[in-house]
Every structure is written in C-alpha cells, then in structure tokens.
C-alpha cells in the first residue's frame, strides 16, 4: 500500500495543513480518487491489448487462412494500421479535450475503438481487418491524448508521481489479458474462434471505461480555464480533503491553478506560438526526443514480431508460441511495476539511463546468441536468445513504460498540455508506422543482423538522455515550468497566489511556499534542459 504514498519532508506542498489521512487507503476522499483514477488507467489497457493482439494471433493457422496467408509486407501493413489511425486522429483529439473537456476526449476515443474492434472481429480479409485496426488506432490516440493528463490533474500532490508512472502499467495488464486469452483459444486449432475470441475481447476494457465515465470528475485545471472555478474547488475539496472547502492545501492548489491559467491567458497559444519561446521549444524538443528513444530502441520487434523471433530459434508450435507470448507479458508487468516503484526515489534520469544500459547488454546477448543459432542450431544459443529477449523487455519496461506519459505530461504547462500530448501521440504513431514496416521487412531480410541497427541507436540514445533529459521528480506540475521558462513564471504565480491565500485567511505556514521554492535553497528548480 505504501507504493502509492510519497511525502518527502522537503516537498513544498507538505507544508500545508490537509484534511486527509497520511495513508490513502484509510481516507475516503483519496480512496474515491484512486477508484476514478483506476477507471482512467483502463484506457491504457486498451492500448496494451491491441498492440499485443497481432503478435498473439499471427501464429494461428485459422487467422492466417482467414487473412489469405499474409506475407511480410502485409504483416507490416496490419501492424502499421494501428499507428495510422493514431497518426490521423491525435491532433483533432487535442481540440476535443480543449473545447469539451478531458472526459469528452476519452468518450470519443472509446466509441471509435468499440466500432473498430467490431469491424476487426468480423473481418475475413486483410483489408477489412486493417480498416478495423485503423479505427481502433484512432480511438486509442484520442483516449491517450486525454487520459494521462486527467490522471495527473485530479491526483493528490503527494501521489501524483506514482499515479502518473502507474498509468502505463495498465498497458501490461491489457497485454496480459489478450495473450492469455490467445493462449487458451490456441487449443481450438483451426477453428475461426481461435482468433476471433481474442479480437472480440478488446471490447471489455473499452466498455468498462464507458460505464465508469459518468463517475469520473472533470479536470479542475480545465474547469478553471473555462471559468468554472467553484466546480473545480468542489472537486479538489472532495478528492483531496474529504469535502473541506477551506482546507489549506486545497485553497493553495486552487490559487496556484488560477494564477497559472491567468498567466497563460496573457499569452494565448496557437500551434505556431507553441514554438515561439525558448522554453516551449525546449519542451517540444524534449517531447520529440522522448518519442524517438522510446520507439527506436528495438523493443517493437519483441512486441509485434515475437512469433518471428521465436521462429528464428526454432520455436514454432502454435501453443508454445502463444504460451511464451503470455509469459513475457507477465514478466513485463513485474518489470514495469519495479520501474514505477523506483522512478520517484531514484529520479527520472537515473531510471532512464539504467534502462537503456540494460537494453544495450540485452541487445548484445540477443544478437550474439541469434547469430550462433543461425549457424549452429544449438539449444544453448536458443536459450541465450530468449534470455536476451526477456532482459531487453526488462530494460524497456523499467523506464519507457512507466515514464513515457509521466514525463510527457509533467514537462508541459496547462495551456500546452493537450497540444503537447497530441504532438507526442502523433509522433509515436508516425514512427509506429515506419517501425512496423522497417521491422517486418528488416527482420525477414537480415534476420539476427537487424539487431545491430538498434544496438547503434541505443548507444546514441544514452548520450541524448545524459545531456538532454532533466530531472522532474518531486515537483508539482506548476513548479516544473520554471525549469523551462526561468524564475519569472513562478514569481508571477507567487505574487498573485500569496495575495489570494492572504485574502482567504490562510496562515503563513502555507503562504511562503513559492517564496521558499524560488528564493530559498531549492536550487534544483533552476536546472536547464
């Protein structure tokens, strides 16, 4: 239970009196907040389910027959289709959530996903199956453009880091769900339901999210932005202080949000203006770098082409392939939980660097053993290759799963958050299209030698992370802004927040918070990207 409890003594928000139990599971408001956050997390399980679906069913004879025995290029198209849908819909989704709210974006995403999964489940050709996956990809893009933002914006300050890092853990739950379903249905042999049942199963998390949506609160930051301050105040009080409207922490959160919104209103941002200031250009550069290092590290080969990797080392029986696929997803979940557990105590940078170092070692093992197996089909080389696959997954899951959306959301200001995540999702899906084709064709043409391309990229990425990735752990979303925009942004909020807090009658124990952050000893806030 302590996994979701983090309150270091030097955190600024810890100085405020708060009507909440230190242990969230003993507090009614925090327990309710965790229930709605869990419902939001389920959106990411749909992503994990769909991205692991093809690797779960592409070894099934019934699926190959229904799809006309697709070749490497057709497999590339099928896998890329999910990203194609996301590439088209990520930016429109950002406008939906800006205009109608975070919950509206999730709703539209789940409806699109539901429609796409129905088409996909009924498909009898590559064209129809691919079309369904395009819609599914569009739905996922809409949901993941909104959901991680909403998670962080409604979470209690002391739990924000863990809530953010656990969001992508649900990717693994979705992957486990589909791989174990496929493992069971693989025993149906050539029956068409062997692959249709796992395909239909993607509706389950989607329907759960839609059923829970009426009970999920809107983002207080979005509500303040739309002038609904009283509603935002009520939500913060309900979930962060058990309904106490004059709670010191709640009043300061509300004041901080209001001043941040006012600051951004003074410089309303269009897409062109998103790149107008040095701070914003740094943010979007970092978003781009995060997208590149989490996509081009070689893990996608294991995700999409696990059956092809197993084939390289002689594991071809349908039930064995689905069994290995199910097993690695459970392993991925454990590794991601470890990463989510240490990202606050270790810090973001240390987790990023450790993860990519592990992937370099794994790549070397996997390449060497795959090469050995290609020349001499020994069981030792085959086992070594599998060890490399699991170690590769561990490195990826340590950082790229828990930190992907955490990092992308927390470096953006309120006004940039929707556009920033839309930018990231668009980049992820665009690269997903390219990677799907590159991996499918490259693995078929080069075999084990294709891993060497990713080894070179991993080494480059370690250098990029060391020089360009800042430390953001232990800071509120508003505090992170000073790392990109300088002290002026936080000084503006300080001056107005202190006036609002004084007017509300909050004692000096809380009012001096930003003064201590900017003018005191917290020098970490002046780090540069």
Image (cartoon, helix red, strand yellow):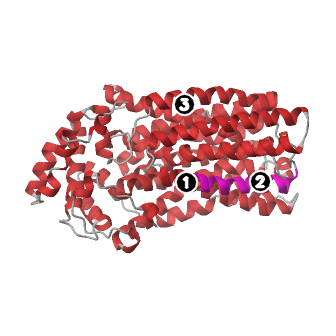
Please report the residue visible at 61 percent of the width from the left and 58 percent of the height from the top.
173
Q: Disc number at residue 462?
A: 3
Q: Could you tell me which secondary element the residue under label 1 belongs to?
A: helix
Q: Position of residue 88 (x, y in %)?
A: 54, 37
Q: Main secondary structure of the magenta part?
A: helix
Q: Could you tell me which secondary element the residue under label 2 belongs to?
A: helix
Q: Is residue 387 left or right of residue 16?
A: right
Q: Which residue is mark 2?
A: 324
Q: Could you say which is closer to the camera, residue 87 or residue 328?
A: 328
Neighbours of disc 1 within 10 Å: few (<14), some (14-19), many (20+):
some
Residue 348 visible to an observer of this rendering: yes
Q: Could you tell me which secondary element the residue under label 3 belongs to?
A: helix
Please report the residue visible at 43 percent of the width from the left and 45 percent of the height from the top.
347
**CA gap, disc 1 to disc 2?**
21 Å
Q: Is residue 188 left or right of residue 93?
A: right
Q: Is residue 336 magenta?
A: yes
* Vertical side of 245 occupied by 464: above or below: above
Q: Which residues are magenta?
A: 317-337
Q: Disc number at residue 338?
A: 1
Which mark is first along the chain, 3 or 1?
1
In which quadrant will I find the C terminus?
Answer: top left
Q: Disc number at residue 215?
A: none
């Amino acid at each position: 239970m302590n996994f979701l409890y983090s309150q270091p003594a030097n955190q600024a928000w810890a100085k405020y009196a708060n009507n909440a139990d230190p242990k969230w599971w003993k507090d009614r408001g925090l327990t309710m907040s965790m229930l709605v956050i869990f419902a939001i997390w389920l959106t990411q399980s749909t992503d994990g389910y769909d991205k692991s679906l093809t690797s779960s069913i592409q070894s099934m004879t019934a699926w190959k027959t229904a799809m006309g025995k697709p070749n490497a290029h057709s497999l590339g198209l099928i896998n890329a289709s999910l990203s194609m849908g996301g590439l088209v819909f990520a930016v429109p989704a950002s406008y939906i959530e800006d205009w109608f709210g975070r919950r509206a974006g999730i709703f539209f995403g789940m409806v699109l996903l539901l429609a796409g999964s129905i088409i996909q489940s009924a498909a009898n050709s590559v064209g129809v199956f691919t079309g369904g996956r395009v819609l599914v990809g569009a739905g996922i893009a809409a949901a993941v453009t909104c959901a991680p933002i909403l998670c962080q914006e409604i979470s209690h300050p002391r739990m924000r880091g863990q809530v953010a890092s656990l969001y992508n853990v649900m990717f693994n739950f979705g992957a486990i769900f589909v791989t174990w379903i496929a493992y069971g249905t693989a025993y149906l042999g050539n029956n068409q339901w062997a692959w249709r049942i796992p395909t239909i199963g993607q509706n389950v998390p989607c329907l759960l999210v839609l059923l829970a949506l009426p009970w999920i609160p809107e983002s207080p930051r979005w509500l303040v932005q739309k002038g609904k301050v009283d509603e935002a105040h009520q939500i913060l009080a309900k979930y962060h202080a058990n309904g106490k409207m004059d709670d010191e922490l709640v009043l300061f959160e509300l004041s901080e949000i209001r001043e941040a919104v006012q600051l951004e209103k003074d410089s309303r941002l269009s897409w062109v203006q998103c790149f107008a200031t040095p701070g914003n250009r740094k943010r979007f550069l970092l978003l781009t770098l995060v997208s590149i290092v989490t996509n081009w590290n070689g893990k996608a080969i294991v995700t999409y082409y696990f059956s092809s990797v197993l084939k390289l080392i002689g594991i071809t029986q349908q039930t064995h392939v689905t069994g290995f696929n199910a097993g690695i997803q459970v392993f991925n979940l454990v590794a991601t939980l470890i990463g989510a557990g240490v990202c606050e105590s270790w810090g973001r940078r240390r987790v990023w660097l450790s993860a990519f170092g592990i992937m370099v070692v794994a790549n070397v093992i996997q390449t060497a053993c795959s090469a050995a197996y290609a020349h001499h089909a020994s069981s030792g080389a085959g086992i070594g290759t599998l060890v490399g696959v699991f170690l590769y997954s561990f490195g990826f899951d340590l950082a790229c799963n828990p930190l992907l959306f955490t990092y992308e959301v927390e470096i953006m200001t309120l006004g940039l958050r929707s556009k920033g995540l839309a930018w990231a999702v668009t980049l992820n899906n665009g690269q997903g299209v390219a990677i799907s084709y590159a991996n499918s064709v490259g693995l078929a043409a080069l075999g084990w030698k294709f891993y060497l391309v990713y080894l070179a990229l991993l080494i480059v990425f370690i250098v990029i992370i060391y020089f360009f990735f800042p430390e953001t752990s232990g800071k509120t979303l508003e505090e992170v802004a000073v790392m990109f925009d300088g002290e002026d942004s936080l000084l503006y909020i300080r001056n107005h927040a202190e006036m609002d807090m004084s007017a509300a009658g909050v004692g000096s124990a809380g009012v001096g918070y930003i003064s201590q952050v900017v003018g005191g000893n917290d020098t970490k806030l002046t780090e540069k990207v």
